[in-house]
Amino acid sequence: MPFQKGRTKTGGRAKGVKNKDISQFKAELKKGLIERLGVFFELLDSPDLSDKDNINGYLRALEFVMPKQQKIEMDADLHTNLISVSFTPTNVLPIKSETELLNE
């Protein structure tokens, strides 16, 4: 059934209802993760892991704290044109204000 303009709302969130506040949950989760960070690094540095698995573990963990770099490709020729600007003195005094000009 296509959308009909002027139709009354039949579902979804009621008007004026605010988003659930999960800031307390996020704060507790962050606190718990920080407290267990040492255990996490002990697991990554475990002698049971091969060097390859150790490095892959660190790389996978980095994905959560550092943004990935995006590859940008340009398909254009870039030419750099430099503009040279030089100033030569004219020995003309600048006008300070319109009233000074009229008073002279």
Image (spheres, rainbow, N blue to C red):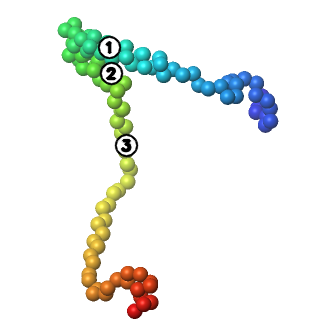
Q: Is residue 63 above or below residue 94?
A: above
Q: Secondary structure at mark 2?
A: helix
Q: Secondary structure at mark 3?
A: loop
Q: Could you say where residue 14 lies in the image, as x and y percent from the top left?
A: 70, 25
Residue bearing mark 1:
35
Residue at image location 31% in from the left, 87% down from the top: 92
Label 1 and label 2: CA atoms lie apart by 20 Å
Residue at image location 40% in from the left, 92% down from the top: 104
Q: Identity of the amino acid at label 2? A: Arg
Disc 1 crowd, CA 10 A, few/some/many (<14, 14-19, 20+): few
Residue bearing mark 2:
60
Q: Identity of the amino acid at label 3? A: Ile
Q: Is residue 14 above or below residue 82?
A: above
Disc 2 crowd, CA 10 A, few/some/many (<14, 14-19, 20+): few
Disc 3 crowd, CA 10 A, few/some/many (<14, 14-19, 20+): few
Depth check: give the residue in front, 88 or 78: 88
Q: Identity of the amino acid at label 1? A: Glu
Within the image, what quadrant is residue 64 found in?
top left
Can I make out residue 44 in this image? Answer: no
* Contact? badges 2 and 3 (CB < 8 Å): no
Viewer-nearest of discs 1 and 2: 1
Specify which label sits upstream in the sequence, 1 or 2.
Answer: 1
Within the image, what quadrant is residue 44 found in?
top left
Q: Is residue 62 above or below residue 85?
A: above
Residue bearing mark 3:
72
Left or right: 38 in relation to 29: left
Can I make out residue 94 in this image? Answer: yes
Q: Could you say where residue 42 lies in the image, as x and y percent from the top left?
A: 24, 11
